[in-house]
Structure formats: structure tokens, C-alpha cells
Image (cartoon, rainbow, N blue to C red):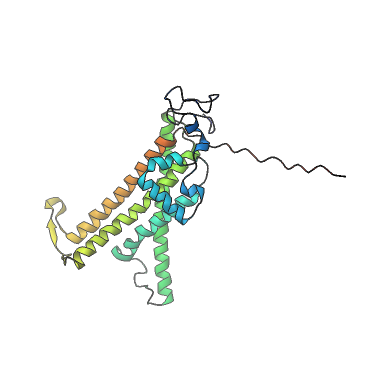
Amino acid sequence: MDDYAPLCETCGYDLEGLDHDSKCPECGRTVASSDPASRPGSPWQRRPGLFSLAATAWALARRPGQLFEHVSIRPGSAWLAALSMLGAGVLVADPWIGVWIHDPARNGRPSESIADFARYAGSFTAGALGVALVFLLLTLIEYRGIRFFSARRGWRLTSAAAWQICAHASIAWVLCGILPLAVLAFKEALVRVLHYSPHSTIDLGPVFGTLSVSDLLSGGGVALGYFLGMMAFEMLVYIGVRKCRFAARLRHTPPPAFAPAPATT
């Protein structure tokens, strides 16, 4: 199965030679709906930018299946994945470097000298890039995995389709940064609004011992946030594979060669 062979996007039946207005003999899906030209592209694919990135994220949150039915199967969307992973890296690194650990430039703040601020900015940038590289590695592993298992199942999941799925699903990595920040905000609200003592403890038995409520919220809540972000990414990939497993690439015809105009007398 090459990348351009016309297959039914539901069952994979070969539609070569069938009329465009007919239906798939195997499952009854219309031939026209499996035409790669019927995929207009996601908002990002149609017009890359920050607004289309937000529109794509909103569409993935509301109706991911519909969005993946519109995704155009073609190379590209590298910037979509890069921006998603960098944004997730910034959100994840912020509490770790700014709150939880003693980073090398903890004392460097905007109110200090320029050199201290530069060290702090460099430390934060290195942390954000490191987290983004971890997300990139996980995304590439997922890309290889869905290609492998799709081939085992007899699906035609092209390399372009697999990458578009992973690139669009990478928006979910941002949840790994947003959810832990929400936990921190909730803990801060307990302390400031409800005047709850962060030093209150809970006895979790002989295995875990006695933990403070602050540590429990920070550790357990953040771990739960990372887990939910991972699950959101996996769910989007699963939906994307189901919608794009037989999708064909759009065959672009090359422009006609330049022909000089006939000479006039």
C-alpha cells in the first residue's frame, strides 16, 4: 500500500476505479469522503500562527475525532510540535526551578545584578529546554510505536499521517505543566484564603509514615497532573490513529513547465 493509493478510510478497501459518487462495497462509506482532497486541514495546517494554535487546541479539546478527520495527510507541522513542547517545557520547569529545588541561580532575580539575572534566565532556559527534549523523545517513541503496531495490524498508516497525529497530539503535553500549577494554586488558596496550616500532617501508616498536607498536595497532585497529561496525549494519539489509519496523502501535481510564448511578427 503506497501513500497515495485510494483506500476506504473506515475499512481499508481498495477504491481504485470506483466512481467518486459511489460507496465502498465493504462498509458503505462514500468514496468521496475517503478522498484526501476532502481533508481541509486543521486550523494550524491552514494558517500556522498563535491564533490557529489556540483554535487547534480548542478543537482537540472539544471534538478530537472531528479534527483528525480534517487533518491533511502531508509532511509538516514541525513548528506545531515544537511550540507545544516548548510551552509545556516552560510550564513544567517553572515550579521546579522557581519553587521546589535550589537551582544554581536561585538568588538571581530581576532586582539583583544583571549577571545574577542572566544566570537565573540561563538556568530557567536550560530547564525548559531539557523538559521539552524529554517530551520530544516521548513523542518520537510514540511515532515509532504507532507505525509498528499499525503495520502489524495491516493498516496503512503512512509516515506523514503518523507524524501529523503525534504533532497535533503533542498539544496535550501542555497539560503536564498546567495541572501541577493548578495544584500549587489550590494549595496557595488553602493557605491564604481558608487559613489552612501548610504544616498540618496526615498519618499514612507504617509504609508512608506521617506526611505534611503541603508535601502530599505538591507530590501527589503534581504526579497526578503529569499522569493525566500523559493519558491525554495517549488518548489523542489513539483517536488520531483510528481516524487516519487508512488516509492517503494528497497527490500534488507538479506545475506545468514554462513554455515560451510563440514569437510574433
**Left of 15 or right of it: where is 256?**
right
Q: Residue at x 47, y 39 (%)?
A: 161
Number of numbered discs on residues: 0
| Residue 176, horizontal then vertical, whole percent | 33, 53
Q: Quadrant of the C terminus?
A: top right
Place residue 17 in its image quadrant.
top right
Q: Is residue 215 above or below residue 227?
A: below
On screen, residue 199 above or below 153: below
| Left or right placement of residue 110 versus residue 224 in this view | right
Q: Residue at x 42, y 53 (%)?
A: 54
User: Which residue shows up at 38% across the image and 50% down it?
Assistant: 58
Seen at 49% across and 43% down, the residue is: 41
Q: Nearer the viewer, residue 102 or 146?
A: 146
Report the residue that reaches farthest toward the top: 25
Task: Single out the residue that lies furthest toward the right.
Answer: 265
Of residues 215 and 1, the one drawn nearer to the viewer in this rendering: 1
In the displayed structure image, the side of residue 89 where residue 46 appears, left or right: right
Residue 106: percent from left, percent from top: 34, 69
Q: Where does the image place residue 188, in percent across and percent down from the top left?
A: 23, 64
